[in-house]
Amino acid sequence: MNKTPIILWVRRDLRLADNPALAHALMQNRPIIPVFIHDELIEGLGAAPKWRFGLGIEVFAESLNAIGSKLTLRRGKAMDVIKALVRETGANEVVWSRAYDPAAIARDTDVKSNLKNIGVSANSFAGHLMFEPWTIKTKAGGFFKVYSPMWRAVKDTPVAECIEAPDSMMAPESWPASDDLADWQMGAAMRGGTDIVGQYVCVGEADAEARLLGFINSAVERYRLDRDFPSIEATSRLSENLTYGEIAPRRIWHTGQRAMAEGAVGAEHFCKELVWREFAYHLLYHTPHILEQNWREEWNGFKWRGDSDDAEAWRRGMTGEPMVDAAMRELYVTGTMHNRLRMIVGSHLTKHLLTDWKIGLKWFEDTLIDWDPASNAMGWQWIAGCGPDAAPYFRVFNPETQGEKFDGEGRYRGIYLNGWKDQDGHSRTDDFFKAAPKRWNLLSTDPRPNRIVGLKEGRDRALAAYSDLKSSD
């Protein structure tokens, strides 16, 4: 038996089931050394996603322990750490799951090249997506720039069945030294917010699977009808688990497809949302500038407002628009935000307040526990109008009418603004004031602020600005 170990570089794939990189390593019938590296990309994460990543690492380590393995933790530049582990363990192969953002691609390309130069095999695998971005093409052979044609292209494309989780893993003769996860202090930037947001996290593979099955059994039937109503438990909330790889996208896909075959009316729309995530990564891979620049070049001349007191009021949930402010409080209390509300608050910032979408993108990057580079960037550019959408010019969400339509009884706004008890029996309004930084100087007894800008005035101002942009083009 070959006892030369394989290094499994763990990244956004914190699961045992349907993990192609792990499956490849298992097939070699050799010792496997799983390692997680706290490199510069992890160091650069925002407060909430870094903290949540740490929780996921802890649970995944426990899963490995349960099957006779162990997660080695190291901190430093990925290439330096991996080379050191190769020297220490004698490993002659390193495997990992692919990432698709420019920084990760550059890092991984460097690692692969350096390993091959020293005679160590380096192999990357799919797993974070169902469809690799370079495999899905338009009839003309290019990449998709609009979602609907991509959906039509992939909806009947076979997706490989899931790989079962192993019940054991071969251990090396000796384990390399490991850092202590607590020493990394991945939640340091959250300060006291961990106690509040920690009430709402769903961490690890087992809980992600339970979340999926709970959604399928209770909500997928009415998903299309109810998903826009934030006070109803109508969405899967699996974005949190997908971003850390605690559940595989094709596991969700096959579950949704079975529900659709069994007649669940909302299942197809649920599967469409999974492909929306694939579309975001498709664009990220083919047009990586979407992370930092206007996706549509013609928008480079638009005169966005920079950071301001208005943007700060938006961050603090103090715009005077109840639907917007409730959503911003939901974000700060739970680390997530209902998707309908993400569109509403994004529209309000970029259109009524004419503020650069990058300011909103950065705030979400810091505060979302389900932060995903592709979905966050595409979402902000889509709602701002400079992204991949056929008719962005006229879309200005009115938060007042949106509230009437999707929160007609005011329950959602009441929970976050008026101290109403939620379904868990406590006040999320109180939670917000506990979690809010002291420097914000917010008191629960403070009166609600007036609107920063009138809704008609803000809409007219936004449309005039877009008209000026088109005229200049």
Image: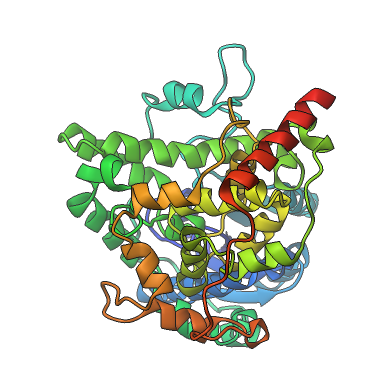
The picture places residue 49, in percent across and down from the top left corner, at 57, 67
303, 239: nearer the viewer: 303
The picture places residue 447, in percent across and down from the top left corner, at 52, 78
Q: Is residue 425 above or below residue 343?
A: below
Query: In the image, what residue occupies the spot 59% across and 35% down?
Result: 282
Q: Is residue 94 left or right of residue 293?
A: left
Give the quadrant of residue 424.
bottom left
236, 93: nearer the viewer: 236
Query: How was the colour assigned to the protein in this rendering?
Result: rainbow
Q: Is residue 467 above or below residue 308?
A: above
Q: Is residue 404 left or right of residue 295?
A: left
Q: Is residue 473 above or below residue 322?
A: above
Q: Is residue 447 left or right of residue 465?
A: left
192, 246: nearer the viewer: 192
| Res 110 visible | yes
The picture places residue 18, in percent across and down from the top left corner, at 39, 50
Quarter of the image with the C terminus is top right
Give the quadrant of residue 178.
bottom right
Query: In the image, what residue occupies the spot 84% across and 26% down?
Result: 472
The picture places residue 316, in percent across and down from the top left corner, at 60, 71
